Image (cartoon, rainbow, N blue to C red):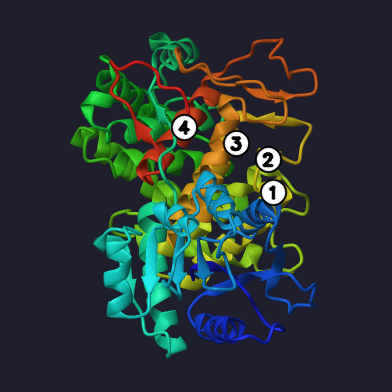
């Protein structure tokens, strides 16, 4: 369901617009989550759905309301504008500016166009939609240049249910199109990570299947395969000159390594990487076939523990014959693992960052299996976790619940929120994915950039004793985690990848 904010006068005020707002909220609740910011000058006591009270003549109060609406994860806001709300009060424009700064679209419902103040044009200038209540008012709004024709809608003011249906329909479309505007562009940089991968797996050390693969190798091979498959789906112009050959080499390196013998507990990473290669049409068919055969064999021996199951799910989504059964079996295990106490909807008995893989896997599996209950379980768990890592605050960075914040855990967090955004279409999840990704660029509790945009390499972690990157440790796993997070954002249309030959663009 879309979550809407309403800014209006509201009961217990007893004037006409307040009663209309209460009727509208009751009608909206049948189709959406609704929270209210009540515009007031009387100091009344309001019901539970009112999350903030705005002093009518205080612009600072309007900005505060914008921050509170963002903290309540609204996808869009409806501003009721009439003779009691906004008339001559520049604070509404401040509220609109605050919403715009946070990428939250808003609709303005204009109830009275007689003698409109100049501030109304400022308010409607950036509105995703302007609602009026008759054809005559629509004609007048066009004459006053409050909005162009494409942003004007006529709704029947007398019937709250009809207004609610129209607002929810408009809200859903607006959220999907406009709620998460692209704020920055990124380049794909591979040279530094490729050098690290070649150092980790020199040609002479290529696995031939006759020896066991170490657990650390399995994780790196799995990451390498998944990123290689993702890179091969990108348009050629966004990859550096050697990007396509590099991705093919990575795929050709990873698959033989993941074919080697390994302990079943390490099969999660192997299935994830092999499944990515098996489902990538850009990979040569012989390599895809090898990956598919090995993936299907490993799917039968995945342990029941949540971590390997969560890792395996992305590699099972979209699988061939038998893959859907393995996916359903693995996803059911995960679903049972998070179906515990409502007060602790987390798979681990402590707030372990790596466990963010589980809600991401539940969402992905639920989408593939058309299981809405499974998707909702993953989304609910992820939303709960967002509040625990500082993302409930509308402005702060992600703060993982551990003294040392690892790049691989941040990367997994970005992928999880991007998956949630793909499932729900809610701007809230898109914004959280991008805020988490900004950790790599320095928007973290230490203010230290972990990612080098020129080489593409990334610091392993930031934390106590590491805040200044004093040891300079940059591993291929961290660089691949950054690439995987970037690919997840690009796949969800949450960022733009610039052509490889263009200048680096600063974040907006």
If you read the primary sequence from the N terminus, does the residue marked by circle 1 or circle 4 appear first? 4
Can residue 99 be seen by looking at this rendering?
A: yes
Q: Quadrant of residue 86?
A: bottom right
Q: Earlier in the sequence, mark 3 or mark 1?
A: 1
- The vertical placement of 138 against 448, above or below, is below
* Dot 4 crowding, Cα within 10 Å, few <14, some 14–19, many 20+: many
**Circle 1 or circle 4, nearest the eye:** 1
Residue highlighted by disc 3: 410
Nearer to us of marks 3 and 1 is: 1
Residue located beneath label 4 in the image: 223
Q: CA distance from mark 1 to mark 4?
A: 31 Å
Label 3 and label 4: CA atoms lie apart by 14 Å
Q: Mark 2 or mark 3: name the one nearer the start of the chain.
A: 2
Circle 3: element type: helix
Find numbered disc 4 in the image and state the secondary structure of the residue it sits on: helix
Q: CA distance from mark 4 to mark 2?
A: 29 Å
| Residue located 69% across and 62% down the image | 345
Badge number at residue 393: 1
Considering the numbered disc 1 on the image, is that residue within a helix, a strand or a loop?
A: loop
Earlier along the polypeptide chain: callout 3 or callout 4? 4
**Could you tell me how far apart the alpha carbons at marks 1 and 2 are, in whole angstroms?**
6 Å
Q: Nearer the viewer, residue 140 or 341?
A: 140
Camera-side residue: 186 or 487?
186
- Residue appearing at x 36%, y 59% in the figure: 146
The residue under label 2 is 396
Q: CA distance from mark 2 to mark 3?
A: 15 Å
User: Which one is closest to the eye, mark 3 or mark 4?
Assistant: 3
424 sits left or right of 502 in the view: right
CB-based contact (under 8 Å), mark 1 and mark 2: yes
């Amino acid at each position: 369901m879309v979550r809407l904010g309403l800014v209006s006068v509201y009961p217990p005020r007893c004037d006409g617009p307040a009663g209309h707002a209460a009727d509208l909220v009751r009608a909206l609740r049948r189709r959406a989550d609704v929270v209210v910011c009540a515009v007031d000058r009387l100091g009344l006591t309001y019901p539970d759905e009112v999350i903030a009270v705005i002093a009518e003549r205080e612009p600072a109060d309007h900005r505060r309301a914008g921050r509170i609406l963002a903290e309540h994860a609204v996808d869009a806001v409806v501003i009721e504008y009439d003779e009691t709300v906004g008339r001559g009060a520049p604070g509404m424009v401040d509220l609109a500016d605050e919403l715009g700064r946070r990428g939250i679209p808003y609709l303005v419902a204009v109830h009275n166009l007689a003698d409109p103040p100049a501030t109304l044009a400022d308010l409607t200038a950036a509105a995703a939609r302007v609602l009026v209540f008759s054809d005559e008012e629509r004609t007048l709004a066009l004459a006053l240049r409050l909005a162009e024709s494409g942003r004007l809608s006529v709704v029947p003011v007398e019937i709250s249910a009809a207004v609610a249906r129209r607002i929810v329909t408009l809200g859903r479309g607006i959220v999907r199109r406009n709620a998460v505007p692209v704020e920055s562009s990124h380049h794909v940089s591979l040279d530094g990570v490729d050098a690290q991968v070649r150092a980790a797996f020199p040609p002479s050390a290529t696995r031939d299947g006759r020896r066991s693969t170490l657990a650390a190798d399995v994780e790196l091979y799995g990451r390498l395969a998944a990123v290689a498959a993702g890179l091969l789906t990108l348009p050629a112009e966004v990859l550096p000159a050697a990007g396509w050959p590099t991705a093919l080499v990575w795929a050709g390196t990873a698959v033989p390594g993941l074919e080697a013998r390994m302990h079943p507990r390490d099969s999660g990473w192997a299935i994830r990487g092999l499944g990515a290669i098996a489902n990538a049409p850009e990979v040569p068919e012989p390599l895809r076939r090898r990956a598919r055969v090995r993936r299907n064999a490993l799917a039968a021996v995945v342990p029941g523990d949540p971590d390997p199951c969560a890792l395996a799910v992305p590699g099972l989504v979209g699988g061939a014959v038998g893959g859907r059964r393995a996916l359903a079996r693995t996803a059911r295990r995960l679903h049972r693992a998070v179906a515990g106490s409502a007060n602790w909807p987390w798979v681990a008995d402590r707030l372990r960052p790596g466990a963010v893989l589980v809600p991401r896997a539940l969402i992905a599996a639920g989408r593939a299996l058309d299981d809405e209950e499974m998707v909702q379980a993953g989304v609910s768990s992820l939303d709960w976790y967002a509040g625990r890592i500082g993302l409930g605050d509308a402005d702060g960075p992600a703060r993982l619940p551990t003294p040392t914040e690892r790049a691989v855990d941040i990367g997994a967090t970005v992928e999880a929120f991007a998956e949630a955004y793909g499932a729900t279409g809610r701007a809230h999840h898109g914004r959280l994915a991008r805020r988490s990704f900004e950790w790599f660029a320095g928007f973290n509790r230490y203010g230290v950039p972990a990612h080098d945009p020129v080489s593409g390499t990334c610091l392993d972690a930031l934390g106590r004793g590491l805040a200044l990157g004093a040891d300079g440790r940059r591993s291929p796993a961290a660089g691949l985690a950054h690439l995987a997070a970037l690919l997840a954002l690009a796949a969800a249309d949450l960022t733009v990848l610039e052509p490889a030959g263009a200048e680096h663009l600063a974040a907006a």
